[in-house]
Amino acid sequence: MSDSSAESRRVLSSSRNSRVVDRDSESSMEGAVMTKSGMRVYKIVLLGQGGVGKSALTLQFVTHSFLEYHDPTIEDAYQQQAVIDGEVGLLDILDTAGQAEFTAMRDQYMRGGEGFIICYSITDRRSFLEASEFKKVIERVRNTDEVPIVLVGNKYDLEHKRAVTMEEGQALAREFSCPFFETSAALRHFVDDVFYTLVREIRMKEKNDILALEKRFKKKDKSIKLQNLVRKVFRKKSSTTL
Ligand SMILES: Nc1nc2c(ncn2[C@@H]2O[C@H](COP(=O)(O)OP(=O)(O)O)[C@@H](O)[C@H]2O)c(=O)[nH]1
Ligand SMILES: [Mg+2]
């Protein structure tokens, strides 16, 4: 691993209590975490059955290298700065190592995640079916289906072992209402696209949330103005009739 990649691969403790590398440099602003320098932190969680390539995708994105083996039981977080559509952001990526079953710890990081990458392997049908389970877990924990998600069918370089068609992946993504990529962590194909697309989805949701909030306030503002007007008219009427 090169010096620069070692630097960018800022491995965090797998204990959720000491989750952030530079705790002092981050502050929380209404859900959106910012660094002291004003950089937006995007909390991304990778989910999927063991062996589908979550760690390989994460490490390719962060260190630009492909590892033949990564301990499947290791759950780690990494931070990677990226300029996406001209806007800089710090991607805080949690590479999970668990099943879709509910645990208290999973509940905690599912709530903390702003966007999710659900991975399956195109060579493993079971991992494809499992993807739906992970989507259900997100919905259950977040109590909404409006969470930014990207669906990923990894290992597309292993075409000869394909067990899930691209059309099936696309259909599932339509069901999830989310973007879809077939990737190869081994060849570094569409790896950046997955992470960048998820950041775009998070940004889009944020904009929509703000617009909805503004609309609500405007409505409230309008109704207050109307109430005041009615009061004024009523006061005028009652003073003339006296
Ligand atoms: N051919 C190929 N192998 C991959 C790819 N991604 C991961 N692997 C291999 O699949 C195995 C499991 O990958 P890993 O990242 O540990 O899976 P995880 O359990 O989901 O984190 C490892 O042997 C990887 O080298 C890929 O895109 N193509
Ligand atoms: Mg792993």
Image (cartoon, rainbow, N blue to C red):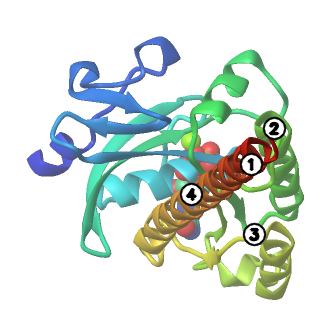
Residue type highlighted by circle 3: Thr
Between the residue at mark 4 and the residue at mark 2, the CA separation in whole angstroms equals 37 Å
Between the residue at mark 3 and the residue at mark 4, the CA separation in whole angstroms equals 46 Å
The residue at which mark 1 appears reads as: 240
The residue at which mark 2 appears reads as: 100
Q: Which mark is residue 214?
A: 4
Question: Of tags 3 and 4, which is closer to the observer?
Answer: 4
The residue at which mark 3 appears reads as: 123
- Dot 3 or dot 2, earlier in sequence: 2
Mark 2 nearby-residue class (10 Å; few <14, some 14–19, many ≥20): some
Residue type highlighted by circle 1: Thr
Q: Position of residue 122 (x, y in %)?
A: 73, 71
Q: Position of residue 206 (x, y in %)?
A: 53, 57
Residue in front for this viewpoint, 41 or 56: 41
> Circle 1 — which element?
helix
Between the residue at mark 4 and the residue at mark 1, the CA separation in whole angstroms equals 39 Å
- Tell me what residue is drawn at x 27 percent, y 66 percent: 87
Question: Of tags 4 and 2, which is closer to the observer?
Answer: 4
- Farthest residue in the bottom direction? 167
Looking at the image, do the residues carrying marks 3 and 4 touch, with CB atoms under 8 Å apart?
no
Looking at the image, do the residues carrying marks 1 and 3 touch, with CB atoms under 8 Å apart?
no
Q: Quadrant of the C terminus?
A: top right
- Left or right for 99, reference 89: right
- Left or right for 169, reference 39: right
> Circle 3 — which element?
loop
Between the residue at mark 1 and the residue at mark 2, the CA separation in whole angstroms equals 71 Å
- Left or right for 13, reference 138: left
- Tell me what residue is drawn at x 86 percent, y 38 percent: 140
Mark 3 nearby-residue class (10 Å; few <14, some 14–19, many ≥20): many
